[in-house]
Image (cartoon, rainbow, N blue to C red):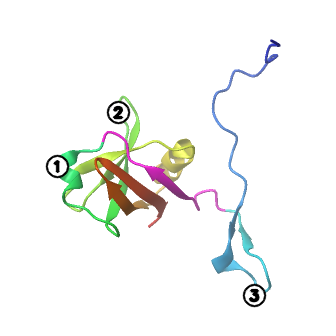
Amino acid sequence: MSGGGGGSGDWRPEPKAPVLDPKRSGGGSGGGVVDDPCVIDEVTSLNSVSPAALRNVGPGTLLEVVFMAGPPQRLVAQDNTGQIVGSITSRSMLQFIECIQSGRRYVAEVLGIQGGSCQVRVRLA
């Protein structure tokens, strides 16, 4: 086996590249480039789902994405009563946190529920 070589030791992901957004295209084919790193649209499953809270949501329900400074730091999806439905772990978690701290708001739209599992789409509100 070969080693990975040296590195900066920085575990944080690189900044995200611009996202293509077809809604902002200039009228031609293809999408326009969005320079806003807070334009994130990601499908993920909630973790540590609360069975009690899950009973009150269904496909199409919009949950508010909230950053909890902790410790530990976490992103949670809350229903309209403030009850935590589950936590969000995502490859874009650090970007979500930075954007929320700068004033942006995100929602997690419930796509489906199967047993105790809840799939959501996280996007700007």
Mark 1 packing: few (<14 Cα in 10 Å), some, or many (20+)? few
Q: Is the magenta stretch mostly helix, strand or loop?
A: loop
Residue appearing at x 80%, y 85% in the figure: 28
- Vertically, is 102 above or below 68? below
Residues marked 1 and 2 touching at CB (< 8 Å): no
Mark number displayed over residue 70: 2
Residue 47, position as x, y percentages in the image: 37, 41
Q: Can residue 33 be seen in this view?
A: yes
**Which image quarter is the N terminus in?**
top right
Mark 3 packing: few (<14 Cα in 10 Å), some, or many (20+)? few
What type is the residue that disc 3 sits on?
A: Gly
Of the two numbered discs 3 and 1 in the rendering, the one whose residue sits closer to the viewer: 1
Residue 86, position as x, y percentages in the image: 32, 46
Mark 2 packing: few (<14 Cα in 10 Å), some, or many (20+)? few
**Residues in magenta, as a range:** 36-48
- Viewer-nearest residue: 60 or 10: 60
Q: Label 1 belongs to which residue?
A: 52
Residue 25 shown in magenta:
no
Whether residue 93 sits left or right of residue 88 in the image: it is right
Residue appearing at x 67%, y 26% in the figure: 10
Whether residue 72 sits left or right of residue 11 in the image: it is left
Q: Label 3 belongs to which residue?
A: 27
Residue that protrudes farthest toward the bottom in the picture: 27
Q: How far apart are labels 1 and 2 at the CA level?
A: 23 Å
- Vertically, is 45 above or below 103? above
**Which image quarter is the C terminus in?**
bottom left
- Label 3 vs 1, first from the N-terminus: 3
The image quadrant that residue 112 belongs to is bottom left
- Label 1 vs 2, first from the N-terminus: 1
Of the two numbered discs 2 and 3 in the rendering, the one whose residue sits closer to the viewer: 3
* Element assignment for label 2: loop
The image quadrant that residue 15 belongs to is top right
